[in-house]
Amino acid sequence: MYHRLGEHLARLPLGWHSAGRVGEVSVLAGEGVLRAMSVIAHLLAPFISACVTPLTIVAVMLAFNWQLGLAALVAAPIVAAIQIWTARSTAATDAQRHERDTEATGRVIEYLQAQPVLRAGGRSGERFTSLDDSLREVRRASRRTVLATLPGTVGLTLTVQAIFAVLLVLGTSLALGGTVGAAEILTILVLAARSADPLLSLADIGGKVRGARAELARLDTVLRTEPLPEAPEPIQPAGHGLEFESVTFRHGDRTVLEEVSLSVPQGQRVAVVGASGAGKSTLLQLPARFHDVDAGAVRVGGVDVRAISTEVTSALDPVNEAAVHEGIERLMAGRTVVMVAHRMRTVRRADRIVFLDGGRIVEEGSHDELLRHGGRYADFWNISMTPAARE
């Protein structure tokens, strides 16, 4: 299962591996697989024994005395009803517990990844508030899970004890009436007592089976996620030009890009500008096949595979930023480049600028042309050049 899960994860689109799935995949690939596989390895035999043993004992009791056997048989639907009721009542709390575990795991990974920065700033001893909050939620979810399963456990225990008490009273009555001998009654009561332990173990085994079933469902969901289709015969790109032809891309119910057409000749630099949520990052992810488009086509020399450069200089001081840009300039020489810009001064050297709004291209041209046009880009530029925006 580990091999199958790992191979499948490696074939899924890069866009599927979002930040929110770090904790989910970590829990699934660790505790999830072990819990799911434990059904076959450790729970299957005890579960069958807990179900079959009492039914076998009831069959023997029916052979001894139909009245006592029938009284014991009444427990079967009651036990089944309690198990079903417990499963339904704990389903919500089990799901909440899984969500909290996933979130906490993601926070732990985030905390570990942040250690170099925290230590460089001398803040490694400080509490990580988001992680503390996540762990508190895990504790609360665990308590709710215990409280949710408590009625089922108590109900099952009381049912087993009540049935045994009924058998004891009924057997005593039959023995006193001379219908059944004392030896037979003793044998039947010993058998009834023998069936109590397997029945009571159903509460614990049932909880583990429900947890494993939920993990199996999550594993199934991941394994059923369609990987990106691979071309049977890959085509060598004829150059490095990039073209978006009537591209539409949806994420869930939201249309991120709609009918976007853009051509970037080989060797040209294009900067994509727009407000947050306009679809800039998605536009860059599509040529690298983080996702496949829902409509239209993305072409890079005839093949949907290429390297993408994104802007990573927003947190640098002016001296280091200039050094980084100088290095990027050398790397970009003669290459086709599409870049997303957050600091507007980084786009001035682009051969062409595309302004994206609501998943559509609303303006396109050089820096000077768009400023003279006085449209959305000009407004964006003027706002970014104000003292407050520069700070």
Image (tube, rainbow, N blue to C red):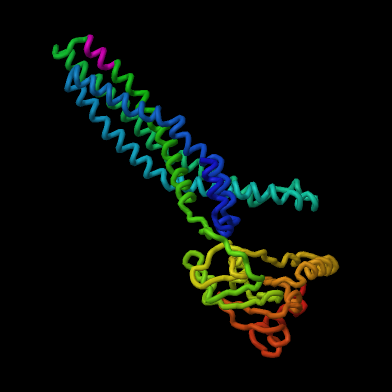
Q: Nearer the viewer, residue 164 or 112?
A: 112
Q: Quadrant of the C terminus?
A: bottom right
Residue at 67% across / 84% down in the picture?
365
In the rendered view, would you say 258 is above or below 183?
below
Magenta stretch: dominant SS? helix
Q: For residue 375: magenta?
A: no
Q: Is residue 248 left or right of residue 150?
A: right
Residue 272 image position (x, y, % from top left):
66, 75
In the rendered view, would you say 292 is above or below 182?
below
Residue at 48% across / 56% down in the picture?
226
**Residue 29 visible in the current orientation:** yes
In the rendered view, would you say 382 is above or below 55?
below
Residue 155 image position (x, y, % from top left):
35, 34
Q: Nearer the viewer, residue 32 or 158?
A: 32
**Residue 137 visible in the current orientation:** no
Residue 25 image position (x, y, % from top left):
56, 48
Q: Quadrant location of residue 372?
A: bottom right
Q: Quadrant location of residue 197?
A: top left
Q: Nearer the viewer, residue 359 or 130?
A: 359
Q: Is residue 313 left or right of residue 284?
A: right
* Outermost residue, right side: 319
Residue at 46% across / 30% down in the picture?
42
Count of numbered marks: 0
Q: Is residue 147 left or right of residue 363?
A: left
Q: Nearer the viewer, residue 106 or 173?
A: 106
Residue 131 image position (x, y, % from top left):
63, 49
What range of the chain is rendered magenta?
Answer: 183-189
